[in-house]
Amino acid sequence: MLQRLIDRRMGFFLGALFVAVVLIPLGNLVIAGQPVPSYVVALLAKYLCYALLAVALDLVWGYCGILSLGHGAFFALGGYAMGMHLMREIGDRGVYANPDLPDFMVFLNWQELPWFWYGFDSFIFACLMVLLVPGLLAFVFGWFAFRSRVTGVYLSIITQAMTYALMLAFFRNEMGFGGNNGLTDFKDVLGFNLQSDATRSGLFVLAALALTAGLLISKFITTSKLGKVLIAIRDAESRTRFTGYRVEGYKLFVFVVSAMMAGVAGAIYTPIVGIINPGEFSPANSIEIVIWVALGGRGTLVGAAIGAIIVALAKTLLTGWFPEFWLFALGAMFILVTIYLPTGVLGKFEQIVKRKPKPATKEVTA
């Protein structure tokens, strides 16, 4: 089974990830002179969270044909679930020194903690919510959408409407999630200072492990009999339904799994960057995730992760050098990939490798 999950493509990527997991913390914590600065560790950890989010989208889009423009919502909900726990961990160390209410609630004259904040003082409870909240939203949304046989561009539009509605809701102070500012000023997680180099390296390793788990789970699903049905749904949904398969159930299952993976990515992302706000619900963020997957290679899983890292790195560099041109560069990247790289960067690279002529061998004569 392990050989089926880890093919050559997956093996190379996981091997490179393992090397990074060993060398980057060493360069930050052990080697004298700290050749890998702390901000680089945090930046790379953020890229790995994006890679996991891209894998989650590729699972539903690349293998089941569900083009979701709302995966940013699942990512943000996972981030808020973890952010609520981190806010509870602050306790009386906040600006207003209130042991029960976060600073923004004290500022807004809240008198008591809302009921939906109960339980988030427990890390285990927060981790369960990281999975359950995005998963439940995906289940309810998918139940109605897939049973109504909403497909194609119509499904994409309503997923985008969903994340836009959530963004507007979370911007409201009355929701109890920090309004426009969101949740921030985190101090520690499980007692570990979030500003320390060791904690940042630990979060980097955690992001790498989560990405590895996401890739293997997705690979297990796509290489199983279930995966073959998903591909059949992607290529010919009507024919698959007519052969007797309950298409709605398969689509709902993979959509919920994908949402949970996106929630995990958001949960790890929040302590890394130190903030979660309604801007993460922005429809533009969900569209950017689609670009990651298209650039790396739809239906490859590993390509989606690579595409996310490439775009995130390009964004970091270009917004520093030419901030006003970043969106134009992103749009141009998507257009060029659509026209010239229909199989993505990974697909193009594999085509080049296959075309490379093998060295001639001399015949041995007796």
Image (spheres, rainbow, N blue to C red):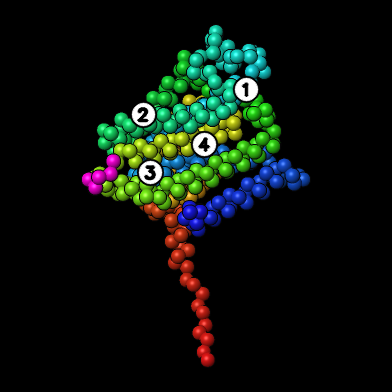
Q: Identify which residue, 144 or 51, lies in the foreground.
A: 144
Query: Which range is magenta?
Result: 242-246
Please tell me which of labels 4 and 2 falls first in the chain: 2
Cα–Cα span, label 4 and label 3: 18 Å
Please tell me which of labels 1 and 2 falls first in the chain: 1
SS class, disc 2: helix
Cα–Cα span, label 4 and label 1: 21 Å
Marks 1,2: beta carbons within 8 A: no
**Neighbourhood count class around disc 4 (C-alpha, 10 Å): few under 14, some 14–19, many 20 upward:** many
At horizontal 66% and vertical 16% (from top left) the residue drawn is: 92
The percent position of residue 64, horizontal first and vertical second, equals: 35, 44
Cα–Cα span, label 3 and label 1: 37 Å
Q: Identify which residue, 165 or 3, lies in the foreground.
A: 3
Please tell me which of labels 4 and 3 falls first in the chain: 3
Marks 2,3: beta carbons within 8 A: no
Q: Which residue is mark 3?
A: 61
Cα–Cα span, label 4 and label 2: 21 Å
- The disc placed on residue 89 is 1
Q: Which residue is mark 2?
A: 140
SS class, disc 3: helix
Which is more foreground, mark 3 or mark 1?
A: 1
At horizontal 45% and vertical 48% (from top left) the residue drawn is: 220
